[in-house]
Image (spheres, helix red, strand yellow):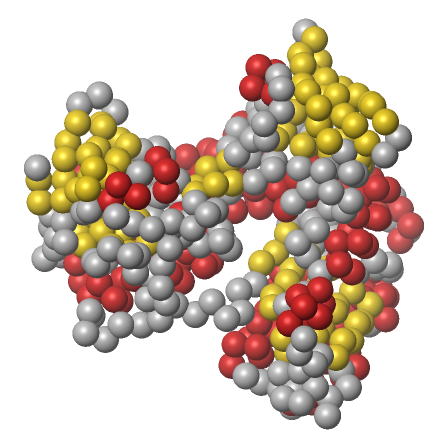
Amino acid sequence: MRTFDLVIIGTGSGNSILDPRFKDWNVAVVEKGTFGGTCLNVGCIPTKMFVHTADLAATPGASARLGVDSTLDGVRWDDIRDRIFGRIDPIAAGGREYRKNHADNSNVTVFEGTGRFTEPKVLEVTLTDGTKQTITAPKFVLAAGGRVTAPDVPGLAEVGYETSDTIMRLAKLPKKLTILGSGFVAAEFAHVFSSYGVDVTVVARSGALLRSEDDDISGRFTALAQEKWDVRLDRKTVRAERDGDVIRLHLEGPSGAETVESDVLLVAVGRTPNSDILDVVAGGVAVAPTGHVVVDEYQRTTVDGVYAVGDISSPYELKHVANHEARIVQHNLLHPEDLRKADHRFVPHAVFTSPQIASVGLTEREAKASSQRYVVAEQAYADIAYGWAMEDTSGFVKLLADPASGQLIGAHIMGPQAASVIQPLIQAMSFGLRADDMARGQYWIHPGMPEVVENALLKLVLD
């Protein structure tokens, strides 16, 4: 058994913990797959690079009503795909090379393989060559992320479906794509592939898309999606089968039995933490019913000296959350006498579909369930100067605030650049700025997009 000062499992956000302050630590890094984690390789970064090209491809379809006649001559899938991964793959390879061989990492040993705990703070790593190595340390960081899941549908495993891990590396662009799922992954890839000219069908088990969003956001987005894609709501997937090049889903819905056929099937129903792969329970680490590693406000697990960050422990499963948690753990490893707490009060997220969606804080559904007083205000993009210039007819901002304190408790935006427009609202919530002070205490550039936020703030009726 080899002994280290620190073992980090996973090279996503966990890999960012190491900096020159750890040069005197004997560190082991364990990685079972590609360096860089989900975000770099199969998540945030490549998907948003695809989204950007999709936004460009979709522009001609919206420009004619503004007097600009443009056409989409074609989409070169190979060029789009290869440009994206031609940039990303070298970054992952460079990260691996840096950790393994650079002089800055002379104190770091990289183990490439799958680790499993055999007892508290003892990890058996099955290396890629099949050999095994057992390692231990007084400090561990669990940063092994999560993986995609698939529903238990008869025949699904045999038809050859894609996931968010594989869909971006298709050999060719499909003519028809069926997406099984109704969350953010489904919404983003539906936008991407439909913008490229693919016939997209979305199959949802529930009665709306993006149902975890505020009901007004989810409802309006679902209505817009039904105008662009073949959206099948309230469908149970009974079985899947392949007939040559055709994948067929047999469904049951409000009108009875039906089928959907396509040449590619994307399964996008969710993710699960990798705690079971690590067998953290054998290591004494408690897990929640969802499989997430249980952590306290300092990111400590139930085993002294063992921390966890990112998707393996966070129900948010967001890169910016993982990065924040990694900074907290980094500090707490270096300064055990002065621990810092992670701040999960106001965690924002965005869905890079069309139109873009961003949210932070409580939905109105959650506010009602909390029994606290709140007021609501909405502002349409169409009623601000820039929105009017774009002739945006669907975008809006919805704010919730505590009328007594004036504090925002929720913000939800659907429309152009929502992920950027929401940032001042995140800042106000994080630093306790009253909604009325935020609206009136600063200039808002006219006719900038953030005026939609200003006008929504001014509509809030506070005590």
The residue positioned 70% from the left and 51% from the top of the image is 211
The answer to whether residue 158 is above or below residue 221 is above
Question: Would you identify the image quadrant in which residue 376 lies?
Answer: bottom right
The answer to whether residue 446 is above or below residue 312 is below
Q: Is residue 37 visible?
A: no
Is 323 on the left-hand or right-hand side of 105? right
Query: In the image, residue 364 lies at what x, y percent?
Result: 71, 67
Nearer to us in this view, 117 or 75: 117
The answer to whether residue 375 is above or below residue 110 is below
Residue furthest bottom as drawn? 463
Nearer to us in this view, 132 or 446: 132
The residue positioned 70% from the left and 8% from the top of the image is 243
Q: Is residue 299 visible?
A: yes
Query: In the image, residue 118 lies at what x, y percent?
Result: 20, 37
Is 14 on the left-hand or right-hand side of 230? left
Question: Which quarter of the rendering shows the C terminus?
Answer: bottom right
Is 391 on the left-hand or right-hand side of 9? right
The residue positioned 76% from the left and 47% from the top of the image is 208
Nearer to us in this view, 424 or 294: 294
